[in-house]
Amino acid sequence: MAVPKRKVSKARRDKRRSSVWKLDAPAFSKCTQCGELKMPHRVCPNCGFYKGKEVIKKEA
């Protein structure tokens, strides 16, 4: 059975685990109607359009 020869330091252990906690920035796409940034696969909060159809009535 394999046994470590020396104790693994906290710094070395934490360096190995550091990549697990990296956060990804949220993805954004441009709205085809108004050009504002919006989250993909969601209704545009600015104009209320989704896939070229008006889903939410927004006043100009």
Image (cartoon, rainbow, N blue to C red):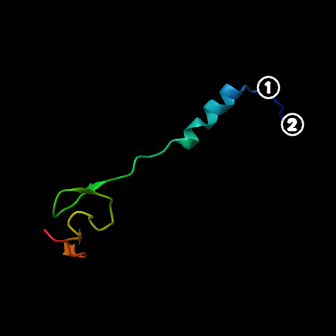
Percent position of residue 29, x then y: 27, 56
Quadrant of the frame with the C terminus: bottom left
In the drawing, does residue 13 fall left or right of residue 28? right
**Residue at the extreme top:** 6
Q: Nearer the viewer, residue 19 or 57?
A: 57
Report which quarter residue 9 is drawn in.
top right
Cβ atoms at labels 1 and 2 below 8 Å apart: no
Report which quarter residue 36 is drawn in.
bottom left
Give the CA distance from mark 1 to mark 2: 17 Å
Looking at numbered disc 1 in the image, what kind of residue is underneath it? Lys
Mark number displayed over residue 47:
none
Percent position of residue 38, x then y: 28, 58
So how many labels did they put on this image? 2
**Residue at the extreme right:** 1
Q: Residue at x 16, y 64 (%)?
A: 33
Q: According to the image, label 2 marks what residue?
A: 1
Q: SS of the residue at dot 1?
A: loop
Q: According to the image, label 1 marks what residue?
A: 7
Q: Sequence order check: which comes first, mark 1 or mark 2?
A: 2
Percent position of residue 23, x then y: 48, 45
